[in-house]
Image: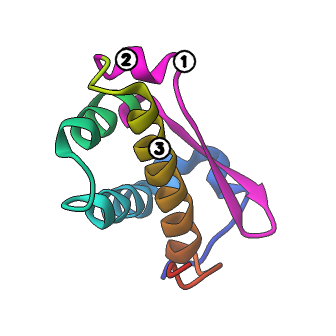
């Protein structure tokens, strides 16, 4: 677990790159094998690559997604299913970020 400094999170890619990468990877692995990889993979490669994590305060993180995520992902299958997988993955990333920085155990 990494000691967290909210002020350093403003320059997160300088101070916390490894932790961010770890949280995103763990969230992906949590869903890998559980959801359709034809939906999960384009989300990971095309949508999350343009996402931005933010610290909201009180141990909470938010992942902001780029505009038009479904279109950005190449419209992989059913839009409703895509959005459900995307929501699950974003929630998992936010949970993993809390765990990575010691705000939660990551097992919600």
Task: Tell me what residue is drawn at x 54 percent, y 85 percent.
Answer: 105
Say whether disc 3 or disc 2 marks the residue closer to the N-terminus: 2
What residue appears at the point 18 percent right and 45 percent down from the top-left corner? Answer: 37
Can you identify the residue that label 2 sits on?
72
* Colour scheme: rainbow
Tell me: residue 87, above or below residue 105: above
Quarter of the image where the C terminus is located: bottom right
Measured as percent of width and height from the top left, residue 106 is found at 51, 78
Measured Cα–Cα span from mark 3 to mark 2: 16 Å
Mark 2 or 1, nearer chain start = 1
Between 8 and 104, which is closer to the camera in this rendering?
104
Q: Position of residue 53 (x, y in %)?
A: 57, 45
Discs 3/1, front? 3
Q: Is residue 105 left or right of residue 80?
A: right
Q: CA distance from mark 3 to mark 1?
A: 17 Å
Check disc 3 and report its element: helix, strand or loop. Answer: helix
The residue tagged 1 is 67
Residue range highlighted in magenta: 48-74
The answer to whether mark 2 and mark 1 are in CB contact below 8 A is yes
Check disc 3 and report the residue beneath it: 84
Cα distance between the residues tagged 2 and 1: 8 Å
Name the front one of labels 3 and 2: 3
* Disc 1 secondary structure class: loop
Residue at x 18%, y 37% (from the top left corner) = 38
């Amino acid at each position: 677990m990494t000691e967290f400094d909210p002020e350093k999170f403003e320059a997160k890619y300088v101070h916390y790159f490894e932790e961010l990468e770890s949280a995103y990877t763990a969230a992906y692995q949590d869903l890998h094998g559980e959801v359709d990889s034809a939906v999960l993979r384009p989300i990971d490669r095309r949508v999350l690559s343009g996402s931005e994590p933010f610290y909201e305060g009180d141990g909470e993180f938010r992942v902001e997604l780029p505009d038009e995520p479904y279109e950005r992902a190449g419209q992989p299958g059913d839009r409703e299913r895509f959005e459900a997988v995307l929501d699950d993955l974003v929630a998992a990333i936010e949970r993993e970020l809390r765990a990575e920085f010691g705000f939660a155990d990551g097992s919600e």
